């Protein structure tokens, strides 16, 4: 059992608190991703779990053991760093074997584990090479391999893909996800890239300014963000935020944005709008909620025409991103490529 | 020191999995560059272990054993592999080494004597030529023997049989390796004292690498023929033996 429990975990540097009493339960064999902008405390949290940072307050449990004061080497964890942290004077084989040698593992076991891991990661042909000759992706695989040979209960990965180019990042994302399934271990992964978070995680922890904003599955975060930060952070292109005035229209509620009346269909939660009647709220619209024409699969009563000036159409291949402006508000819509012929018009 | 850190940590070009394998001299140069630091350390080990003289054959065997692992592109744990190879091959290497030295010494002496006589009667050129051929053949067989000894679990007649076949089957590479090693020492002697440090830096290990490299294919071929295997997995055998 290698579930991890963070209870009121805090990190302070003098008067500055960078992680504020966070609570988090990470299940055994879960792939959890800490995501947030730079300086939100995600790496600090990871480093506290790794034992590389002292815990200033709260409790940190790995399994049933309180590990606040347990040295890093005695926690059954392995960490992969952003800059790979490979030993430049050692071959790939020696880099991978080093941790096991320190633990005085038998030679045969070291040999077997290194070769098995190299086979899994497809780096057998690199074993007798030094890191200097390796590309970024190959180094990343070696860094993963070095963590894997120790067969730890928990893998900690601190922005492992951020030094790679976009193409390689895509393939490594898939590789790490498959690896998690194969190894059946707990993965805690830090990134500022929400695409990585959405595509890889079982659950995502969104952090900002040292506080956890929301913890949920990628789809739940996307569909039901708890605040504007999460709504804006998750999703690419990001959610459009429009100020609307809440109005009642018979039994229905609408959000009025100038001449546009958005139907606010909240199902059985409609009563929650009552206190805001006549007041301004922020309406979040995902870029894919815009359509160039009335969609067949959405009831007409929950749609409304919306006029905006298209500043720029960005063809993405499978779809088109329209950068629009309406009453001083910039917005972005994601429409099908069939709309290409229509983008010459000033509005959709 | 930032430049050093940057140089050490900067991203490389990457290594293609299916890149064509280097062969011949290109491979030799590649191994030389790749293993330069380990070769320097190996040189020190061979030098130190050869100081008692009687241990020189075993030190050479250990050096050839380590360089065989380098040629097979396997990971080398220098001290461990050298120490084990030295201990494992000590008796065999010493016996065969002394035997080879004795034959080479006798043949050399015969060449010297008949060379003196040839100055007075041309008929003595023939034994001189035979003596030179014997020296070359014995040296080649000795190189192949040391190579085979460190690569395969052979001893006695079988080992000699493999070495003889290897030397006869692929004599040119073995002769080239021998010539290269002799040249290294000749350069050291001719340009002394300018080259006073070459034995300390690379003469022993580079010589061992050249000898091992030149006999590598020959011994593999001979081993497979004598053991009746068409496709010998010499690399696996060598690695398993070295690691044992």
Image (spheres, rainbow, N blue to C red):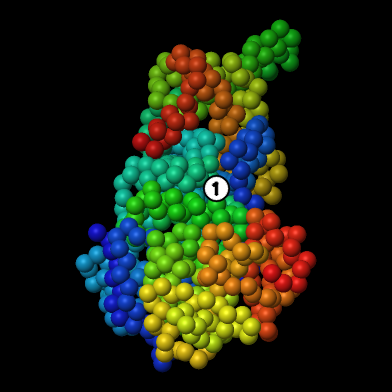
Residue lying farthest to the front in this orientation? A250
> Which of the pair A292/A220 is nearer the observer?
A292
Q: Is residue A322 toward the left or the right of residue A208 in the image?
A: right
Residue most extreme to the left: A64
Residue B109 in the image, given as x and y percentages of width and height: 59, 21
Q: Quadrant of the C terminus of chain B?
A: top left
User: Chain under label 1?
Assistant: A
Picture residue at 32% right of the left edge, 77% below the top: A23
Q: Quadrant of residue B207?
A: top right
**Label 1 crowding class (10 Å Cα cut-off): few <14, some 14-19, many 20+?**
many
* Residue A217, picture quadrant: bottom left
Residue pictured at 44% horizontal, 64% vertical? A219
Tell me where residue A270 appears, x and y as whole percent: 41, 79
Q: Is residue A252 left or right of residue B206?
A: left
Location of the N terminus of chain B (image quadrant): bottom right
- Residue sitting farthest toward the right: A344
Vertical side of A265 occupied by A282: above or below: below
To which residue does mark 1 refer? A129
Q: With respect to residue A151, does A156 lie above or below?
A: below
Q: Is residue A131 visible?
A: no
Q: In the displayed structure, would residue B211 be above or below residue A294?
A: above
């Amino acid at each position: 059992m290698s579930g991890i429990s963070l209870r009121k975990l805090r990190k302070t540097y003098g008067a500055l608190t960078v992680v504020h009493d966070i609570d988090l339960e990470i299940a055994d064999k879960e792939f959890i991703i800490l995501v947030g902008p730079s300086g939100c405390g995600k790496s600090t949290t990871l480093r506290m779990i790794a034992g590389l940072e002292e815990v200033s307050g709260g409790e940190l449990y790995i399994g049933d053991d309180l590990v606040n004061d347990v040295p890093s080497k005695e926690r059954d964890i392995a960490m992969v760093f952003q800059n790979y942290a490979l030993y430049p004077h050692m071959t790939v084989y020696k880099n991978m074997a080093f941790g096991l040698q320190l633990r005085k593992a038998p030679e045969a076991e070291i040999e077997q584990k290194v070769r098995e891991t190299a086979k899994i990661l497809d780096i057998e042909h690199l074993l007798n090479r030094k890191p200097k000759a390796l590309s970024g992706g190959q180094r990343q695989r070696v860094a993963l391999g070095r963590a894997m040979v120790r067969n730890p209960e928990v893998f900690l990965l601190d922005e492992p893909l951020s030094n790679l180019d976009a193409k390689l990042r895509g393939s490594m994302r898939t590789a790490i996800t498959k690896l998690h399934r194969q190894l059946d271990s707990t993965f805690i992964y830090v990134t500022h890239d929400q695409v990585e978070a959405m595509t890889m995680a079982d659950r995502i922890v969104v952090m900002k300014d040292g506080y956890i904003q929301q913890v949920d599955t990628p789809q739940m975060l996307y569909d039901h963000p708890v605040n504007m930060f999460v709504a804006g952070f998750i999703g690419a292109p990001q959610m459009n935020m429009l100020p609307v005035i809440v109005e009642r229209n018979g039994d229905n509620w609408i959000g009025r944005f100038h001449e546009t009346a958005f139907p606010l269909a909240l199902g059985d939660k409609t009563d929650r709008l009552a206190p805001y009647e006549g007041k301004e709220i922020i309406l979040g619209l995902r870029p894919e909620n815009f359509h160039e024409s009335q969609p067949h699969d959405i009831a007409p009563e929950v749609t409304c025409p919306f006029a905006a000036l298209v500043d720029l159409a960005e063809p993405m291949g499978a779809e088109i991103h329209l950068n629009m402006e309406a009453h001083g508000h910039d917005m972005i819509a994601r429409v099908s490529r069939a709309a290409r012929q229509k983008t010459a018009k000033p509005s959709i | 020191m930032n430049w050093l850190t940057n140089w050490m940590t900067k991203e490389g070009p990457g290594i293609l999995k299916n890149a064509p394998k280097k062969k011949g001299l290109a491979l030799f140069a590649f191994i030389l560059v790749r293993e330069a630091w380990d070769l320097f350390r190996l040189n020190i080990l061979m030098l130190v272990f050869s100081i008692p003289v009687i241990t020189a054959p075993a030190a050479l065997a250990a050096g050839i054993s380590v360089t065989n692992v380098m040629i097979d592109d396997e990971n080398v744990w220098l001290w461990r592999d050298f120490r084990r190879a030295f201990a494992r091959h000590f008796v065999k290497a010493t016996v065969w080494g002394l035997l080879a030295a004795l034959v080479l010494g006798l043949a050399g002496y015969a060449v010297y004597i008949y060379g003196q006589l040839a100055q007075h009667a041309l008929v003595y050129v023939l034994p001189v030529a035979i003596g030179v051929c014997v020296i070359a053949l014995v040296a080649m067989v000795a190189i192949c023997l040391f190579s085979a000894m460190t690569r395969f679990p052979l001893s006695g007649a079988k080992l000699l049989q493999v070495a003889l076949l290897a030397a006869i089957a692929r004599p040119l590479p073995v002769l080239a390796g021998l010539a290269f090693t002799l040249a290294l020492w000749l350069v050291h002697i001719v340009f002394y004292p300018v080259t006073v440090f070459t034995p300390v830096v690379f003469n022993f290990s580079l010589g061992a690498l050249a000898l091992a490299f030149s006999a590598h294919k020959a011994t593999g071929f001979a081993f497979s023929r004598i053991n009746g295997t068409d496709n010998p997995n010499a690399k696996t055998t060598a690695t398993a033996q070295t690691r044992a």
